[in-house]
Image (spheres, grey):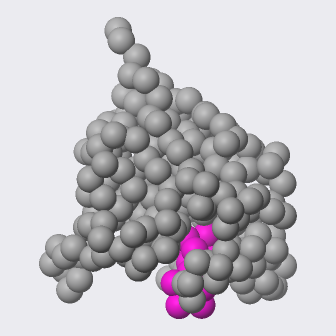
Amino acid sequence: MTTAPPLDLTVSDEVRALAPSFTHIAVEARGLVNGPSDERSSALLADAQRRLTTRLAGRAPHEDEHVAAWRAAYTAFGAKPSRTRNSAEALARRALADGGLPRINLLVDAYNAISVAYLVPVGGEDTDRIEGGMRLVRASGDEPFETAAGGEPVIERPEPGEVVWRDGAGVTCRRWNWRQGLRTRLTEGSGSALFLLERLDPMPLGELTAAADELADHVRRLSPGADVTVRGPQ
């Protein structure tokens, strides 16, 4: 059986200059069998909420040093971090609210659990829907971003200078890790996935590695037989 080559991932010099401490780890998985949320993925989310509560010890998510670093990075490229929160802060706020974390599907639940437990932004993309490689760049402002408004699909454009993940067809995630696009999101039918875990100082690199390894273990347990590889840090 031929093994597919790893997806090409690059970070532009402009983004490196904006946030020199930025590091990411990729977890790639193929041969997946995804499906609706179940008691296993719900247990991961419940455990993540408990770990978050212990970690914060009564503080608000934005008072965590790593979340504060992401707020500063967002401010640096012109975003308002209290209006468009990084994905880790947004999920943590939901975890602490009365409704708790949403149940989406097995793979999304798994990476959301890691994001909340470690307070680290984590994204998941359907590798089969990515065109070419993935690049973290500062947007020109004319790239298409497929999203929804009022339940209907729409095309948005990022703001010039905004940090975005993109592939050959357009933007896959706006404002670094704020909002994922519809085109490459993980669905119950996804058979291949790319998970990106992203850190800034002062989060220890070893903690990012531990988060990636734990996510890989979750994916292997939720989808036995999948080929899961941890790549990085980069």
Residue 53 appears in the picture as rendered: no
Q: Estimate the x, y position of residue 63 in percent, counting from the top left.
A: 78, 83
Q: Residue at x 35, y 62 (%)?
A: 171
Q: Where is residue 71 shown, x and y percent of the image?
A: 67, 80
Between residue 167 and residue 196, name the one nearer to us: 167
Q: Quadrant of the C terminus?
A: top right
Is 90 inside the magenta-drawn segment?
A: yes
Give residue 88's quadrant in the image.
bottom right
Residue furthest top as drawn:
1
Q: Residue at x 20, y 86 (%)?
A: 150
Whether residue 215 is visible, yes or no, is yes
Name which quarter of the figure residue 116 lies in.
bottom right
Magenta region: 81-93
Q: Report the residue at 47% width, 50% height from top.
A: 135
Horizontally, is 61 left or right of 91 in the view?
A: right
Image quadrant where one finds the N terminus: top left
Q: Is residue 169 above or below residue 119?
A: above
Query: In the image, is residue 1 part of the stretch drawn in magenta?
Result: no
Q: Give x and y (percent) for residue 139.
A: 43, 68
Front residue (pair 51, 210): 210
- Spot occupied by residue 46 in the image (x, y as percentages of width and height): 60, 64
* Residue plotted at (45% across, 58% down): 165
